[in-house]
Amino acid sequence: MGINAKQVQQLREFTGAGMMDAKKALQETNGDAEEAMKLLRKKGLTDSKKRDGKVANEGVIGSYTHLQQGRAVSGVLVQLACETDFVAKSEEFIILSQQLAMHIAAMKPIVINKEDITEKDIQNEKEILRSQEESDGKEGEILEKIIEGKMKSFYKDNVVLEQVFCNPDFYEGTVGNMIDEFAGRLGEKIYIKQFYRLEIGNQ
């Protein structure tokens, strides 16, 4: 079927894709905009994975401050890395860094990646869960499945990339997937290098 310019423009506005990519996606999906969006999303994720070995020495510091009765009671700084100065200065990248800072302030993760949690801490958490479930009479295979499920919740509570992003109006899905999709759209490797969260009353 024929693809008109209005369809291409609408898809570009929704996805941030280039004109040729949007047109090709519509052609491959026979003009189905929803399927074309899924196709572009998959392509973006694939392209971002190809850039895993690239060096990302540019970036920006995103920040967020939470005010209470006119005073700042918590704040976050997040270093978001990318490959080029061009992307680092783009409005889309800067907004992403600010959104990530807001998310970290709200959800209070303690690490960026699952790999940042030590094996000792993982085993300690499992032992605590095991003790709790065994006291409730759980055992055997059922016990192990319960622990596995609760460890997934543990990661979602503490690992920023595993958390569901706090603002569904901006993005629906995990922080990790959101960063991957932005990396695909902007054509560069993007990742959280580090973050700091300060809160009055916490050491």
Image: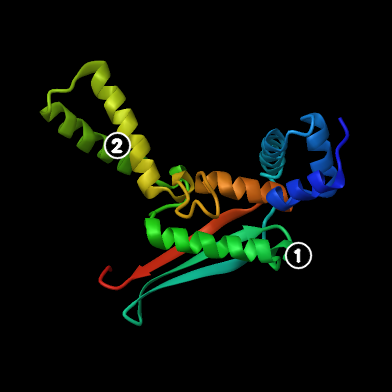
**Mark 2: which secondary structure?**
helix
**Residue 84 x/y as whole percent:** 74, 61
**Dot label at residue 46:** none
Mark 1 Cα within 10 Å, few/some/many (few <14, many 20+)?
A: few
Depth check, front residue: 124 or 82: 82
Distance (Cα) linking label 2 and label 1: 43 Å
Q: Is residue 7 depicted above or below 13 in this figure?
A: above
Q: Quadrant of residue 47?
A: top right
Is residue 99 at least partly visible in the picture?
yes
Q: Amino acid at mark 1?
A: Phe
Question: In the displayed structure, does residue 93 sit left or right of residue 18?
Answer: left
Residue in the image at 59% along x and 60% along y: 96
Question: In the displayed structure, does residue 80 sit left or right of residue 137?
Answer: right
Q: Which corner quadrant holds the C terminus?
A: bottom left
Depth check, front residue: 195 or 184: 184
Q: Residue furthest top?
A: 141
Q: Quadrant of residue 68?
A: bottom left
Residue in the image at 38% along x and 54% along y: 110
Q: CB of mark 2 within 8 Å of CB of mark 1?
A: no
Residue in the image at 51% along x and 64% along y: 78
Q: Earlier in the sequence, mark 2 or mark 1?
A: 1
**Mark 1: which secondary structure?**
helix
Q: Amino acid at mark 2?
A: Gln
**Dot label at residue 86:** 1
Q: In the rendered picture of this protein, how many numbered marks are placed on residues?
A: 2
Q: Which corner quadrant holds the N terminus?
A: top right
**Residue 184 x/y as whole percent:** 70, 46
To which residue does mark 2 refer?
123
Question: In the displayed structure, does residue 7 sit left or right of residue 71?
Answer: right
Q: How is the image coloured?
A: rainbow
